[in-house]
Image (spheres, rainbow, N blue to C red):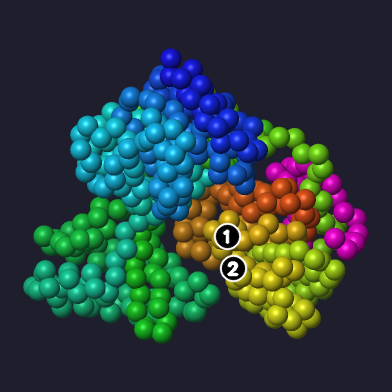
Amino acid sequence: MLEARAHQQLKALLEREGGEPWPHHLSLSRLVARSLRRSDHTLVRLAPGCEPSWWISLLVPLALSECPLALVVSEAQRQRLLQVELPRLGRADPSLALPCFEGDHPPSHARVWLLNHRQLVGAWQQGTLGERQLVIPEAEHLDGLLRQALEVVVTPQHWDQLRRAQPAAEASLLALHERLSRQVLSHPRNPNHLVALAPEDEAPLRHLLQLLSPLPDPWPTWLAAQGDDWTSWARVNPEMLQWQLHRQPLEPLGVLRGLLEQRGAVVLGQLASARAAAGQPQPGLELGFEPDVSVALGDPPLADPLPLYAPLRQPLPNSPHYGQHLLEQGRRLVLGQTGLTVVLLDDDGLRLGLTSGLAAEFGSRVVHESTAPEGNGVICARWDWWLTQQQRLPLPSQIVVGLLPIASLEDPLTAARVLALRQGGRDWFRECLLPDGLTRLQLGVAGLRRQGGRLAVLDGRLRGRSWGRQVLHALEPWVSLSRLLPH
């Protein structure tokens, strides 16, 4: 039986390698092997921030299985797989060498097809996936990666190609482009240079394109991406006075509904435990993914809870005194620290002001989004930057959350998703913004638990809003710090 073979092979491999093993290697291997053998749906919840050594437990049953598979990974995980994990598997046991075929059209006899999310969407739309079972190792990013895979981007060059392909409509196309350009470029500047576009803004262009044929890429795709399930915005380059048209689905899992129906799938990712995720949407549910088995493989129990500094009475982020509050508390938190401090907030004005204020106090120790800090340095950064770069940095001894990672409604995509939920009478904050924010928070602070550092939350909403209890629940186990001491 596949489970027994995978168990024996992995156990022998880990014994030969030695070292401190991840406690769930054998459990994960058996779960994956069972799912492949039965062609069912299995969801594995890994602890947020867990070490990537779990890859070997996933790859051993894939190497031993004989069923056709599609392994779907992001570019970062693909690099790790090809440069680290597959060579490690081959060195440990040549009989386990896993042949992976890449590209849009692998040979029909290729057993393991290595795909990114854009290739997965293309293969499903073209019907070339066949009966392959899917293995998706990054469930925590599945929604965002599929949305990017479905995104349609129209550049200034695409407008030129359209005019050359349809010279009879050149005057009308120029007029429509000029009209959109005036609307986009006259919009008040914002830090992210994004301008939301309503359906009525695009309607004249859409009506004209429906009368023209043939259309060069990506215009047919843009034309097909229509309806209330999609939204558009322009990304402005203020230096060049140019803009790109972006169009993405609000809920990509709904656009790809049925992808996992009648097909085995193993979905695993760094997700909150089932208890912590109670009431939140199941990853991949709209894809037809209804897990037959759902298991949480958490980290071993902690000897010490996470020290949390979160004073009871703090100003809210919309307070005029909030920037000064961040600076005063930031000085106290950095003072006496001998290790790395990471300060996280997405508001550009607040972050840059705080960086300048701390640099005036602590000098060159303070940097902005740098991967080469001093040993006792202070990094001020956006949440996205930290989640992407934290593997390249030493573990921090302290993380200061200036603003909780709740998405801003100034982002056109977020605003469109919220509007759609609001029109449906749904709780847009607890169904959309809060679950995403909690996942990002857990991923961002996971390293503190291994380092034994402390967490400071300076966002007054933690104590001042009812949903703050869910944030505290997501951080468990923790112990409150009533006052600051040198750490």
Tell me the kind of residue under disc 2. Answer: Thr
Q: Quadrant of residue 260?
A: top left
For mark 1, give the secondary structure.
helix
Q: Disc number at residue 171?
A: none
Query: Which residue occupies the foreground of this view, 16 or 66?
Result: 16
On-image quarter of the N terminus: top left
* Residue ID for mark 2: 371
**Closer to the N terminus: mark 1 or mark 2?**
2
Tell me the kind of residue under disc 1. Answer: Arg
Please rate how many residues cluster around mark 2, counting C-alpha atoms within 10 Å: few if below 14, some from 14 to 19, many from 20.
some
Residue 449 visible from this viewpoint: yes
On-image quarter of the C terminus: bottom right
In the rendered image of this protein, does residue 277 appear above or below residue 218?
above
Q: Is residue 259 left or right of residue 31?
A: left
Picture residue at 44% right of the left edge, 33% below the top:
93
Query: Which residue occupies the foreground of this view, 445 or 377?
Result: 377
Picture residue at 36% right of the left edge, 36% below the top:
98
Q: Is residue 147 left or right of residue 210?
A: right
Q: Quadrant of residue 132?
A: top left
**Residue 469 inside the magenta-drawn segment:** yes
Image location of residue 41, percent across then percent down: 44, 26
Image location of residue 193, percent across then percent down: 47, 74
Picture residue at 19% right of the left edge, 65% below the top:
208
Q: Is residue 401 left or right of residue 69?
A: right
In the rendered image of this protein, does residue 461 appear above or below residue 31?
below
* Residue ID for mark 1: 392
Are the residues flagged by discs 1 and 2 in contact, CB closer than 8 Å?
A: yes
